Amino acid sequence: MTDRVLRPAVDPAQVQSRTVLTLMGSQTLGGIGVASGIAVGAIVAADVSGRDALSGLATTTQVLGGALFTIPIAALMGRHGRRLGLATAYLVGALGAALAIAATASGTFWLLLVGTTLFGASTTAGSQARYAATDLAVPERRGRQLSWVVWATTLGSVLGPNMVGPGRAVALGLGLPPLAGAWVFSTIAFGLAAAVLHVALRPDPLITARRLAGVDTEQPVGRQGNVGDGLRLIRRTPAALWGTAALTVGHVVMVAVMVMTPLHMRHGQAEIELIGLVISLHILGMYGLAPVTGQLTDRLGARPVVLIGVGLLVLACLLAGLSHAGFSGGLTAGLVILGLGWSCTMVAGSGTIAGSVPVGQRASVQGAADLVMGLTAAAGGALAGVVMDLFGYALLCALAALAAVLLGAYTVARVGAPSPSR
């Protein structure tokens, strides 16, 4: 599956165009699979475990799996290119979804957590795909190229939560519990995403970028893709450190509030279809305006866009925290704005990381940044379930808003530093 032989003359613009289109296709399929699982994860965990306090563990282990799988996937990409790494991640995610089906059917909580952990590899694929879009992008278009791949997730991610209803019919036809149908769609979607990448992501964008930069891809690549090296380089590179903080805090705030929203709604007797609708609108907010966010990042720089994201995240937490249990307009608006704020911090932070290090170190640094983001979000998701169980949804939203404010303070403190937008 590696790309060791390229034609002597490679048109970077043509390869980049094909790469972006291929990644958009795989992101659409992956988005269906991820969002279908997210929509039912907390509810299935609560039902299988019998405890609301454990409901967040399904999404938490998914986020944790996404973080941990970054290590081997980054190593694969560092050694063999984007295609092998991304396709492998989706296949592991498909296996996880299949185990989640078995766990839902058997009522086995530990198996559910194993399945959702493996399921998290699909989010690794989705996250790393945005970096693949920047491998051959010119600096002045980096934000837009990245954002189009992020945007492509909109189609699948908005459709995914609304597959819960049809999933019931599929599950009944297969003799499974109603909510297991969502995991069936995930399994199929991840398999198709892996197939698209394997067939169409040729030539490999990372290997092509290395060759154009004069990196010898025929020789042993040693530690390329090593996450430990990436962490050390992030600490030594101010722009990469700030970009990592931006995408990490934005992701933690989003995950903490989003993962508990389905349970908050169910406490108010909201129907599963309404829960799926709110989550799909939230995901629309995350991805739908990503191209606008990318253009703003290219024109204004990353710092102003992150500050806009901070403001949106605080507003979202306020609206969600003041909403009553169940379905409401305020909660729905809050979740949409939460997604918009996440989009700003994710696109601006990721673009900064991609442009802050040489091509030979990109896989290591990008993998390390996503590892930090994923592990922190996993911890936040786990704590979110405990906080909600002990103190309620409103306090959870208040704590999430505080984290966003701290990111804003850190960003403002960089006023005298060089802009990390390129």
Image (cartoon, rainbow, N blue to C red):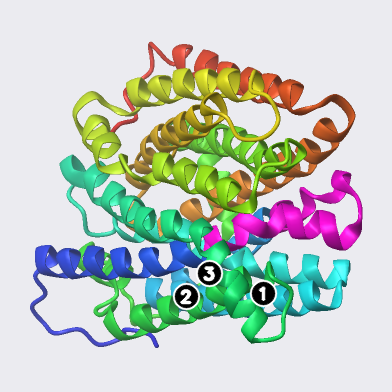
Tell me the quarter of the image containing the N terminus.
Answer: bottom left
Residue name at image x 60 percent, y 25 percent: 320
Report how many numbered discs are placed on residues in the image: 3
State the CA–CA distance, disc 3 to disc 1.
21 Å
Circle 3 is placed at which residue position?
166
Q: At which x and y percent is residue 354? A: 36, 47
Say what amino acid the circle numbered 3 marks. Pro
Task: Say whether residue 361 is left or right of residue 288.
Answer: right
The residue pinned by badge 2 equals 189
Q: Which residues are magenta?
A: 34-61
Q: Work out how far the residue at label 2 is from the one at label 1, CA to CA, in angstroms.
A: 13 Å
Q: Secondary structure at mark 3?
A: helix
Residue at 52% across, 41% down: 234
52 vs 123, nearest the viewer? 52
Name the residue carrying label 1.
96
Residue 86, image x, y percentages: 45, 72
Q: Earlier in the sequence, mark 2 or mark 1?
A: 1
Q: Amino acid at mark 1?
A: Gly
Residue 402 on the magenta span: no
Q: Nearer the viewer, residue 199 or 99?
A: 99
Question: Could you tell whether 119 is left or right of 153 in the image?
Answer: right
In this picture, is 303 found above or below 35?
A: above
